[in-house]
Amino acid sequence: MQMADDDLRDQISRIETDIEEYAITLEGCRKAMLLSKVAIAAGIISLAAYLLGAIWLNSVAVIGAMAAVIGGVVVFGSNLTTSRQATSAMAALERHRAELIDTINLRTIGEGDQHSGSALWGGVGETRH
């Protein structure tokens, strides 16, 4: 029975490693999404200011502002999809981990002992010879 529990613990350990990797992926997605929002905002503000006549931009700057908006939208959408997939995968892994934990033969400390905890604590309250 110990061998099966060890195998389950190894599986749980691998699942926890995978969950941590997905958490790192999610953090990267959040950062990329934030940067893409900044790029979108900068592009829109630049284009709006140009169209309202507040600033003058040459054609390269206008194209750059448009590229920032389009690129930001693409990066945001891509990372949003990746984030959703990672979140879904993490939830599935966490459910699987919980199922595996439930199958492990866990026992309460002192379970099966007649002296409730005496074996654990070396016979606390008992006289040693």
Image (tube, rainbow, N blue to C red):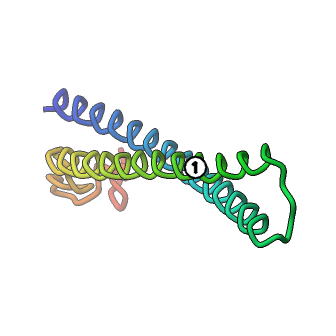
From what the image shows, is residue 67 above or below residue 52?
above
Left or right placement of residue 85 versus residue 80 in this view: left
Measured as percent of width and height from the top left, residue 95 is found at 23, 52
Image quadrant where one finds the C terminus: top left
Question: Residue sitting at 34 percent across and 47 percent down?
Answer: 85
Q: Amino acid at mark 1?
A: Ile
- The foreground one among 129 and 16 is 16
Q: Quadrant of residue 114?
A: bottom left
- The foreground one among 19 and 128 is 19
Left or right placement of residue 110 versus residue 32 in this view: left
Q: Which residue is mark 1?
A: 70
Question: Residue sitting at 18 percent across and 55 percent down?
Answer: 111
Left or right placement of residue 39 versus residue 112 in this view: right
- The foreground one among 53 and 13 is 53
From what the image shows, is residue 7 above or below residue 24?
above
Measured as percent of width and height from the top left, residue 28 is found at 56, 45
